[in-house]
Amino acid sequence: MDKKILDLLYSSFDNTLTPREKEMLDSALEQSEELRREREKIAATRQIIAENSGETFKPFFAERVMRRLESLREKTDPALDLFESLVYMFRRVAFVGAVAAVILFSVQLLDTDHETNEINETVSEMTLDEVLNSAFSPSLEDIL
Amino acid sequence: MRISKTDLQLIDRARQGDPDSFKEIVRRYEQRVAATVISMLGHCPEADDVGQETFIRFYKALRDFRGDSSVATYITRIAINLSLNELKRRKRRMLFFPQSTDSVKNIVDETEPEDVALKKIVNNAIQQLEPMFRTVLVLRLVDGYSTKETADILNIPEGTVLSRLARAQKKLKTILSPYVGEKING
């Protein structure tokens, strides 16, 4: 079956066809027995779904909702509100503090890396003689 | 003679703290929410919880409700979003505790009346769709929203609604083929 015609057939149930598309579909329906059967099947499927989907909750649903609302209202007494606000504030302060600590730690880490690189560069610039002299030639102050 | 109040009148009174007015809203839309939520989640204890939570969220949003969309559309949007959240939670749970899905034979009790059994079969068939196809099908065919309303509720283009709807119907046509045949042949 032509895919475009089949798409038009499905769309036709939702009234979204232009006059040109409707003409195309009508002509195809006239010529094809298979397409006409398909249309019947789609219509029947939609009808079965629409007719068999009416569901209900268990009895006393509205009462259950109202009970939950009542318990929510009880929860929002002023003392509890103050406690919840304090908890909320604490969470925010704790979060900001944690972020600041991470940033400070990262900056500190970067600084340490930088200093280590500087020492490495100084050491690599010394000649072998300078290193040996500084290690094996104690100064007069050291001996005294 | 008792004159029934409009939704907006009830909402006004509920905002002022009248619980009976809100209870009346719950009664008016209970069935619509049940159809949406049970079609999305199937018959399970979570469906009742999601239904209740839908109205709790609506109650909390009463002050923000300006009446731009109808109460039905507003509540349905909440119900759909909460159902999708529940499906995501269910998917996460399934990763750790896989369960087998029931086949048609298992869900239908032979002693049940035919209409009850068919309802179960249709619900089970809808549960086999991916959530994004299921959502469109439920809004369009179960709740009876137009293509444009469905697109507005889900915030997707109308073309996407149509293509998802077509795919959902193709799959359901196959699953429900024995019953579709019966319907056609009378």
Image (cartoon, coloured by chain):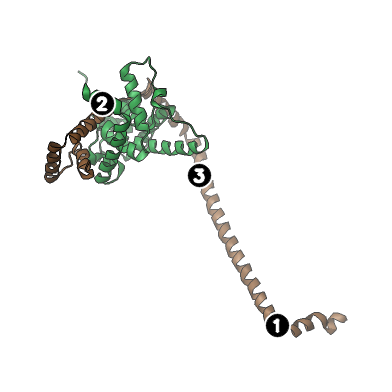
Chain colours: A brown, B green
Q: Position of residue B103 (x, y in %)?
A: 41, 27
Residue A88, label in figure: 3
Q: Nearer the viewer, residue A32 or B142?
A: A32
Residue that badge 1 annotates:
A126
Amino acid at the residue labelled 3: Tyr
Distance from Cα at disc 3 to Cα at disc 2: 60 Å
Mark 2 belongs to which subunit?
A: B
Q: Image quarter for residue B144?
A: top left
Check if mark 3's residue and mark 2's residue have beta carbons within 8 Å.
Answer: no
Q: Amino acid at mark 2?
A: Gly
Q: Quadrant of the N terminus of chain B?
A: top left
Q: Identity of the amino acid at label 1?
A: Met
Label 3 crowd bin: few (<14), some (14–19), many (20+), radius 10 Å: few
Left or right placement of residue A73 versus residue A101 in this view: left
The tally of labels here is 3
Identify the chain of the residue marked 3, using the numbered disc in the image. Answer: A
**Residue under pointer 2:** B181
A38 with respect to B55 (left or right): left
Image quarter hosting the C terminus of chain B: top left
Q: Nearer the viewer, mark 3 or mark 2?
A: 2
Residue under the point 32% across and 40% down: B64
